[in-house]
Each structure stands twice: as C-alpha cells, then as structure tokens.
Image (cartoon, grey):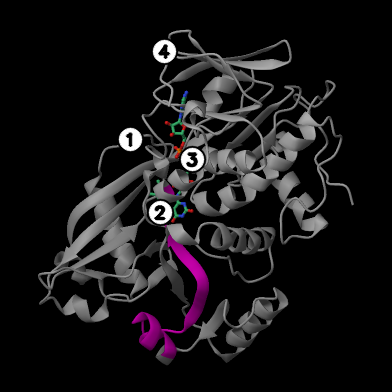
Amino acid sequence: MKNKNTFNTHHQVVIVGAGIAGCTIAGELNRAGLSVGIVDQQSGPAKETSAHETALAHPQVGKKISKLQRFTQLANQIANDKWLSAQLCSQAFESIQGLDAISISKLKELIHEMKYDEQTIQVITENEAKLKANVGAPGIWYESAAIYSLPQICQKEIATLNLDSQYWSCNIAKICFFENTWWVYSEDDLLICSAPVIVLANGLGVQKLLKGLQINLPVRPVRGQLSKFLIRGDSELVAYLPKIALRGDGYCLPAQPLTNHDWMWEIGSSYDEDSVDQAHWIQSDVDNAIKGLNLIQREHSYQKEMTPISSFVGIRSASKDRLPLIGPIENQPGLFVACCYGSRGVLWSALAAPLIRAYVEGFLAGAVRLRAGFLTGASTLLSAEVASSVNPARFFAGALGARTSNSKPILPES
Ligand SMILES: Cc1cc2nc3c(=O)[nH]c(=O)nc-3n(C[C@H](O)[C@H](O)[C@H](O)COP(=O)(O)OP(=O)(O)OC[C@H]3O[C@@H](n4cnc5c(N)ncnc54)[C@H](O)[C@@H]3O)c2cc1C
C-alpha cells in the first residue's frame, strides 16, 4: 500500500475516488487484465458516502415502462449476480394505497410485459402482505430486492488489486494532461501516479478537478440521514414492526430484536438538496420516524415510542436530471467520469463498471465505437440507451461539442 511519500507509478488506468463508484470500476478493469491504480484522500475504501452499510436496491415498477425501469431491472440483476455476498438481507415490500381490482390487473400486465417472472416481482394481497411483511395492505413484493453493505462491496473489489496500486491518504488537487498521459498531483504538489486513462469517481470532488481543466460540470450535493430507533419490548408498536425491508416514501429495514427484548429499527432517509452539512440533525430523525410509521401504516402518535439511538449522514452527488454522469469528457483524451449516483449507488455502480470498461478498452485499442453487448444480459439497443442516457455530453451540447472530439462516439456496433 502506498502513501503520499511514494509516487509516480505509471498504470494503464488511474481511478480517483475509492467509494462504491471507484472501487467497482477498479475491480472490473483489474479483472479485465488492465493495470489499475486507485487514489483516495481517506485511509482506505468506502470512508465517505459509501460508508453506508444498509443500501437498498430493487427494480423499479411504475405506471408504465420507463427508461429508468428498464435500466434498474438490468442493474438489479447485475448487482444480485455480482455482490450476493454483500447482501445483509433480501426481498422488500411496497404497499400501494387504493389498489383495486383494475389497477391490480394493470400492474400485473405491466410486470408481465417487463418479463419479470412471478418469483421476481409479484402483486400480493393484503393477507399475503400481513403474513410476509407484517403490513396490512396490498402491494408489490420484490423478491430480488436486497440491502447491501457498500463497504463490503468496496472491500471485495479492492481486494483484487495489488497493494502497491492503492494510494491512500492522497488528496488530489490537480490533474494535468501532457505527453498523452494524465498526471495526478496531491495538494502539496507531489506527483502521485500517472496513466493514459483517468477515471474521476470522487463524488462531488469531480467538479473541482474538472474546474482545474476549465470544465464546468453541473454537480450538486444532496445530504441524507438514516436513523436507528430503539423501541421498547413492551411498546404497542412492536406488534406492527416490519419483518422485511419496506419501500415507499423512504425505506426501512426489517426490525431487529435485541437481547433484552427491545427492538432496533432503521429508517431512511432525508433528501436535503444543496446541503453538505455532515452533522446529525434532530429534525431528520423526526422525519424518518414519520416515514417509518407511514411505511407500516401506523398513526404518527407512535413516534413518542421511538427513541433515536444513532444515525448515518452522507452527502450524495446528483446531476440536474437525476441520472448519473458516466462516460467520457469531450475533447479530453482518456478522461472519464463516474459520479452523481444520487440515491442509487448500488444500481448505477452495477451498470457503470462494465460501461466504463467498454469505454476504456475501446480507447486503449483506438476503437471508434463501443463494442456491442458490453452490458451482459442487455440487448445492443438497451446498452446504447444506457450509454447515451448517462453520458456527461448531455450537459455540454453546444458548449464543448463544437471542437473535434477525442472521446469516441458512444453508440455500440450493431
Ligand atoms: C442517507 C443515504 C441513504 C442512501 N441510501 C441508498 C440506498 O438505499 N441505496 C443505494 O443504492 N444508494 C443509497 N445511497 C447513495 C449511495 O450511498 C451513494 O450513491 C454512493 O455511496 C456514492 O458513491 P461514490 O463512490 O460516488 O461516492 P463516495 O462514496 O463519496 O466516494 C468518493 C470518494 O472520493 C474520495 N475523494 C473525493 N475527493 C477526492 C480528492 N480530491 N482526492 C482523493 N480522493 C477524493 C472520497 O474520499 C471518497 O472516498 C444513500 C446515500 C445516503 C447519503
């Protein structure tokens, strides 16, 4: 493992940022046989937003088949296949208000149209929901949903890298391009490492590094807080605590019994746009308690029986259209970004790693187009749709696009 006194090692790819975005890309590129270096200002992986131990991932089901639905269906499958060992629990339930016979049959049609089998997503009745989730309302059962520990995924991916490709406690202040190489410098102007390809996966910090290249990327912070509550064993609320992860407006974990017959229940999360405050907010605990009570359809007066005991606060990065930014930066040869995963760190990581791999392999081979079928399990058309929807170029139309592009076109070969 390197610290900032050891520097200037050359790699094929350098990744800045060792959260879930950077670690999953590093693992993917390393498994593809590329020499990868990863740099982070922290002393190890997953110490900032990806310190999140209980992130929910599930496919999306809405009123009609949207782009997001198709993307999350694919991403959820990839995540399940890759990171099963980092799942703390699987399955989730979403209750739906006013689910009458007509809307049930429409929902079933939609689920069928999306080719989900009955085991993956099901519409369940009030009685079934009571049995499976302890919630007395009909809704959607997500068999393939799971709660993931982001640090466990990060550690698993980083473990595939040589120790001397890991640069910890290096705050990167500047990246420069000359002699067909990206040079990566720390805040005390030490050269840390270099490579023909660089992937910026350092969350909100991407914006600052791009600013140094006179590129203005629209990235905004969104603070989030999850809260853990203690519920006493003799509380009436115990009878209604969920047996399974629930989603809706927010999400919660199944309640956990403690050794003294009390219960612990984790609920999240707040979505505080444009705040970077990492302090614990009492108001967020109050809001989370209400969210939890809504998820289990109980009166808000039960809030007095929920004692906040701890919280997790993280700052997400988000783009203007809430889709991530994954792909090349135009006119900057070999420069890629992977950020703005918002509240979908698991799912976007599952799609970003193979997508960035396809870009990087194409770039190093001098290819003009992405190779077809780079997203396993997806059609060429869906792969192309993912690539173009998350491409940072969507925010640069007309601004940088006029000059000759060094970044290759994004459509896969048919
Ligand atoms: C309260 C909350 C609840 C959430 N719930 C869910 C959920 O249920 N499901 C889900 O999928 N996602 C969820 N998310 C989102 C998920 O946590 C994030 O999308 C994900 O962690 C972002 O990962 P990242 O790698 O982009 O950023 P980070 O984890 O922040 O990683 C960026 C890394 O870059 C490093 N860095 C930054 N600048 C520099 C620099 N200049 N030099 C060197 N290193 C640098 C940092 O140290 C950090 O390690 C939630 C987030 C929050 C806050």
Q: In this view, does 57 lie to the left or right of 5?
A: right
Tell me the quarter of the picture where residue 400 sits.
top right
**Which residue matches tag 1?**
277
Dot 2: what SS? loop
Dot 3: what SS? helix
Instruction: Find residue 406 and name its label.
Output: none
Could you classify mark 4 by the number of other residues whose Cα lies within 10 Å: few (under 14), some (14-19), or many (20 or more)?
A: few
Could you classify mark 2 by the number of other residues whose Cα lies within 10 Å: few (under 14), some (14-19), or many (20 or more)?
A: many
Q: What residue type is labelled 4?
A: Asn
396 over 25 or under it: above or below: above
| Closer mark to the observer between disc 4 and disc 1 | 4
Could you classify mark 3 by the number of other residues whose Cα lies within 10 Å: few (under 14), some (14-19), or many (20 or more)?
A: many
> What residue is rendered at 73% in x and 10% in y?
179
**Which residue matches tag 4?**
5
134 over 196 or under it: above or below: below
Query: Magenta segment range?
Result: 128-150
| Closer mark to the observer between disc 3 and disc 2 | 3
Distance CA(mark 3)–CA(mark 2): 14 Å
Q: What residue type is labelled 2?
A: Ser
**Which residue matches tag 2?**
149
**Which residue matches tag 3?**
158
Q: Is residue 374 left or right of residue 254?
A: right
Q: What residue type is labelled 1?
A: Asp
Label located before the other in sequence (3 or 2): 2
Tell me the quarter of the picture where residue 5 sits.
top left
Evaluate if marks 4 and 2 touch, with contact meaning CB atoms under 8 Å apart: no
The percent position of residue 116, horizontal first and vertical second, equals 65, 76
